Image (cartoon, rainbow, N blue to C red):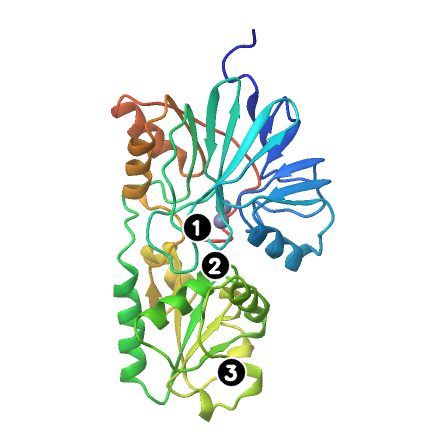
């Protein structure tokens, strides 16, 4: 009989599932990939077969034009892979379509979270705690200093600033997949129903979200409107456009940025951000440690970020843990 869990192995380019000869979120093209969500550091193009939720496949298709070899799996659905491995996709609460993947083989259960958070998000179903033997967790914000404030507070800051400067606009830098749509949906939830203006690079992803049932209210393209029309409005752009000449077409933009890294003052200064909004689609320290406790796995594998502090926390709390050295994961999506 094979040694326990010898069927699943962390490799530098992803997690390999031996009997099924497939990879989870591989950082290079492979024959068969199970993909947790659409961010570029998890979802690459060029795989022979890609198994993911329908929304993740739609996002990948938008980015890479790869409909070939796509195998959709709904939340809660289990598919049988070669070698007697079952894979079940479970909501991760990170972005539209994001999933944790539960792998079962020979009576052993492993959960790979991909990226996740525990806060409510109007754009995707919440993370579900799933019992397992090995829990493979991300650790992007795996330091005790990271404690994300309630998003309603950050929305209030944004709307107060807008109200105080009716002739200006607030320009929010936000990642095109996930963060932009969450900010828009949260603004609507906070009672802001005015048109929101978009940089052209955000348009297709916002439309994809709407096609998947996420209402975003009236969205307009900056390119179609005059400076005067945009006074007193929220404008959303990719972080890279915050300080480039594109923003000259806006009326006196007050620059804001929605990111978990805005907790770090220096990062806000680097980007010339006047209004840092601490909004993250990743679990903060409290969410990471609570999740490890609730899942209560025999062993925790920590990856994708600041592994050391979380590893230490596990040791102090008598939980078995190891850090994985996967390469190629960046914070596209903080
Ligand atoms: Zn992500
Ligand atoms: Zn990630």
Instruction: Reply above or below: 200 against 106.
Output: below
Residue at mark 2 to residue at mark 3: CA–CA distance: 26 Å
Which residue is located at x 44 percent, y 53 percent?
A: 334
The residue wearing badge 2 is 178
Earlier residue among tags 2 and 3:
2
Which residue is located at x 43 percent, y 82 percent?
A: 195
SS state under label 1? loop
Residue at mark 3 to residue at mark 1: CA–CA distance: 33 Å
Earlier residue among tags 2 and 1:
1
- Along the viewing direction, whichever of 288 and 93 lies nearer the viewer: 93
Q: Is mark 2 within 8 Å of ligand 1?
A: yes
SS state under label 3? helix
Q: Which quadrant: the N terminus? A: top right
**Is 179 on the left-hand or right-hand side of 278?**
right
The residue wearing badge 1 is 94
Across and down, in percent, residue 276 comes to 34, 65
Q: Are marks 2 and 1 in contact (CB under 8 Å)?
A: yes
Which residue is located at x 45 percent, y 87 percent?
A: 230
Determine crowd level at label 1: few under 14, some 14-19, many 20+ residues with C-alpha closer than 10 A.
many
- Along the viewing direction, whichever of 302 and 191 lies nearer the viewer: 191
SS state under label 2? loop
Across and down, in percent, residue 272 comes to 41, 68
The residue wearing badge 3 is 248
- Residue most toward the bottom? 228
**Is 47 on the left-hand or right-hand side of 114?**
right
Earlier residue among tags 3 and 1:
1
Instruction: Reply above or below: 178 against 312.
Output: below
């Amino acid at each position: 009989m094979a040694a326990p869990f010898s069927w699943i192995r962390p490799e530098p380019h992803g997690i390999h599932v031996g009997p099924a000869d497939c990879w989870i979120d591989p950082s290079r093209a492979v024959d068969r990939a199970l993909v947790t969500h659409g961010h570029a550091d998890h979802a690459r193009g060029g795989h022979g077969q890609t198994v993911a939720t329908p929304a993740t496949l739609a996002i990948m298709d938008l980015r890479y034009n790869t409909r070939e070899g796509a195998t959709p799996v709904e939340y809660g659905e289990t598919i049988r892979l070669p070698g007697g491995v079952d894979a079940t996709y479970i909501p991760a609460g990170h972005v539209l379509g994001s999933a944790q993947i539960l792998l079962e083989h020979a009576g052993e259960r492993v959960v790979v979270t991909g990226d996740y958070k525990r806060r409510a998000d109007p754009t995707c179903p919440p993370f579900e705690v799933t019992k397992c033997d090995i829990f493979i967790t991300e650790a992007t914000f795996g330091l005790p200093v990271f404690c994300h404030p309630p998003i309603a507070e950050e929305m209030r800051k944004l709307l107060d600033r807008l109200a105080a400067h009716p002739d200006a606009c607030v320009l929010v830098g936000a990642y095109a997949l996930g963060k932009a749509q969450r900010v828009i949906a949260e603004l609507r939830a906070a009672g802001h129903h005015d048109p929101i203006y978009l940089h052209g690079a955000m348009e297709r992803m916002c439309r994809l979200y709407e096609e998947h049932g996420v209402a975003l209210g009236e969205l307009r393209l900056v390119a179609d409107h005059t400076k005067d029309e945009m006074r007193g409005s929220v404008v959303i752009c990719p972080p890279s456009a915050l300080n480039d000449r594109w923003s000259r077409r806006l009326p006196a933009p007050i620059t804001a940025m929605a990111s978990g890294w805005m907790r770090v003052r220096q990062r806000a200064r680097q980007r010339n951000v006047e209004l840092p909004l601490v909004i993250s689609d990743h679990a903060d320290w409290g969410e990471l440690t609570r999740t490890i406790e609730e899942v209560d796995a025999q062993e925790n594998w920590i990856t994708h970020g600041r592994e050391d502090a979380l590893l230490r926390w596990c040791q102090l709390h008598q939980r078995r843990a190891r850090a994985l050295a996967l390469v190629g994961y960046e914070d596209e999506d903080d």
